Image: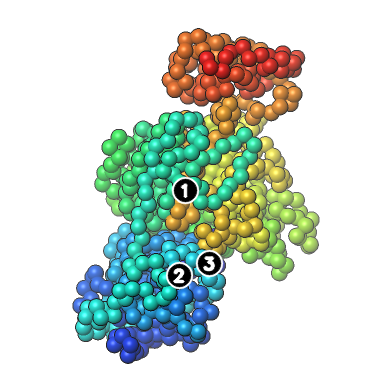
Amino acid sequence: MRYAQVLGSAAAIAGYAFAQEGEVQSTVVYDAETKISYSSYTDSKTGMTFGVALPKNVTDPYDAIIRITAPVANQWVGFAWGGTMVWNPLSVAWPNGQSGTTSARFAFGIGLPQGYDQAEHTYLKGTKTNSTHWTVNALCKGCTGWRNNEDTRYALNGTGTTQFAWAYGLSAVEDPARNDSAFNVHEAYGKWIHSMEAARIDNFDSLVKINLLTAPVATPSTAPTTIVTSVAPSATAKPAAPDAIPASCSGAGSPVFPGNLAAGWKATKIAGGLTSPRSIQFDSAGNMLVVQSGKGISYHKIGMDGCVTSTKMLLSQNNLNHGLAMSPDGKTLYASSMTQVYSWLYDAAAATLGTRTVIVTGMVNGGSHLTRTLALAPQNANLLVVSHGSNANIDTDASDPKTGRAIIKVFDLTKVPSGGYTYASSGYNAGYGQRNEVGICFDKNNMLWGVENSGDDFKRNGKDIHQNNPGEKINYLGDVTKPNDQWYGYPTCFTVWQPSDFTDKTFKVGDWFVQTPTTSMNDDTCTQKATAPKLTLFPHSAPIDCKFDVDSTTMYITYHGSWNRAPVTGFKLVAIQFKLGADGNYTPVEPLTSTSAAKDIFYNPAVEKCAGNGPSFSSGCFRPAGLAWDSQGRLFMTSDTSSNGEVWILGFDSLTIFATRLPRAVLFQPLRDLQAINLTSIFLLLVLIIICCALKIDRAQHLSLNHVSARLGYSANEGRHLMTSVFRGIERPLHFARVAYKNGGPAIIDTIEEATKVRWVSKQR
């Protein structure tokens, strides 16, 4: 659940690209200490002052001096060079002992602004802190020009006027001495019109030279970490020893934050140091591609053990922020920015891309929800599905699908017009009225599902109900080869999670409600007109990806985490059981009225200490984001903390690793819990074990298991997982009977229990 005006440090005013209008509010101020004349603006309410000085020659690219002065109560201050807190360089500064620290940042979406390696600050004289105020004075290279969210170069007009913006926070940054420190949500923000012409001064270069700080002005314990504040790249991970789910991966580093796992599960960090990693895609050669929001797409070779053996940037393009998809033949890659969808020809072996093509354009530039999720229809790879969120918490105009907001659309890749489709007016609908359907996934029947981030700050007839309402949703969207013009409720109809919060009417979990009922739009109207979800999820969890297992008996969902709830919630990976209904369609096992369908798989040990609106590191939590299965049935997950993002590999430990991927299997319940076991399945499993032992078949071989595996209902790939588990737990081979088909007799249970006591195959063999 996201709403730009209150979330995510200085980036919280994302999308508010202020118009450059009104009178100039800056004046020329001369500083006697540095002998620099600044075009300066003071905000009377906050007592903050912002000064800018430019060279006479302002041909792009050109440098600038930025001087920020603020009361000591303001623990950090952000200066937006483009007048908005996303998609332009930010100079973020804070006091540091008797000195100050500044950091080049860039917010590519809603969240903590990332370190920006295309700009750097060099401290100048005047950087200091006293009992009432602090000042940071610095030369900035790379602040006056940048690549915007259309991936084109933009530069400030150094001879005219421009819109600048500020934001500040009252809570201290995580570590004042570090320019990569995290900081918390802003207290306020503002904007003004600034004269760039008045900022141009004579002798710019010589004034910079005589004012350079050659050493920190503060004490060693509180000095800036460096004089130049550029961001260094992270190291590449190294290979690790083979294992199905490795105990560790060399070069990946220790987990940044602790995590807990459900019984039988294992999770290992395979990569770290990433920049806001989001979606994952495996190519035809088994390489892992990861969207790093605000950076591009990274390419990771994966060893047999699941660890990363080498890493490189496949594509550096900072407007890519989430969406990623691959054609079934592995030869075309798709990725999205806030406003466009692109494609490239792709060579998996060479790890190279061809020329970029625009597939879809015209998506909303700004607003509260900036990601555009992509998927290709499994039954027709020429159909590209693109999800687009709303423009605000309650985006009233999105009730009309023609706005192209709060909607999922489908585009035919065989008919892409020159310049690409225009999102709002092209393609056809796969459902509309979904507030922010970030996670979309296909089941085994090739039917589309989505997980929806619902609304914030809710009231019912003026009564606050936001803590535990409305629920997030799992929506069934169906066959994307056909238009779906069903309305899924937003921006009017929402689902109840905690009925006791409603005092004017009796509700059940999953019922529709509106915030302020009227005769023309009320709860009953929603029931009559809106398509109900299949399941309601815990409010404010922020589900942002979903993936079914191979037989669609489980949907895995990442909960990115809340900001609009105290204590916070989410920050975990959950699993929801599905079944095949009488109509041949998959559906959740639990009813719509359930509040216990989502089972925790990988979660933070103290979620109440997490902070969805706070700094990525002082929040003390990992943040699940993207999910993907590799060809071996292992689940990979990103954690998109801004500057030290991680990738994890998950699965069941030892014998259970293949269990979730087997059709009609049970998850290693105690033997007495099984209601039925098939004798034939058990016999074939035993024969398989004996043959492989006798022939001394290596555990890493693919084996010739197609026939036997097929008899058991397994694919060859699953058969290989079976053999891996056999050789890892050979002393207890009959435990595989726990995943046999449930169509035999319960009398076999005693036989199995007795057999497991016999160590009839040596551990050494």
Locate residue 687, reporting x and y percent.
56, 10
Q: Locate residue 353 relative to residue 385 in the image: left or right.
A: left
Q: How is the image coloured?
A: rainbow
Please name the residue shown 41% across and 43% down the image.
251
List the residue tagged with mark 2. Answer: 221
Please name the residue shown 41% across and 45% down the image.
290
Q: What amino acid is labelled 2 in the image?
A: Ser
Please name the residue shown 28% across and 42% down the image.
352
| Crowd tier of the residue under label 1, counting other residues whose Cα lies within 10 Å: few below 14, some 14–19, many 20 or above | many
Asked whether the viewer can see residue 477, the reply is no
Q: Which mark is residue 184?
A: 3
Q: What amino acid is labelled 1 in the image?
A: Glu
List the residue tagged with mark 1. Answer: 646
User: Mark 2 or 3 closer to N-term?
Assistant: 3
Image quarter (top left, top right, bottom left or bottom right) of the N terminus:
bottom right
- Quadrant assignment, res 49: bottom left
Please name the residue shown 53% across and 79% down the image.
73
User: Mark 2 or 1 closer to N-term?
Assistant: 2
Q: Locate residue 90 relative to residue 717 in the image: left or right.
A: left
Q: Residue furthest front?
A: 220
Locate residue 89, reporting x and y percent.
37, 67
- Front residue (pair 720, 181): 181
Cα gap from disc 2 to disc 3, whole angstroms:
23 Å
Locate residue 268, reporting x and y percent.
51, 40
| Crowd tier of the residue under label 2, counting other residues whose Cα lies within 10 Å: few below 14, some 14–19, many 20 or above | few
Q: Locate residue 448 relative to residue 154 in the image: left or right.
A: right
For label 3, the SS is loop
- Front residue (pair 517, 651): 651
Q: Is residue 421 above or below residue 114?
A: above
Q: Is residue 330 above or below residue 622?
A: above
User: Mark 3 or 1 closer to N-term?
Assistant: 3
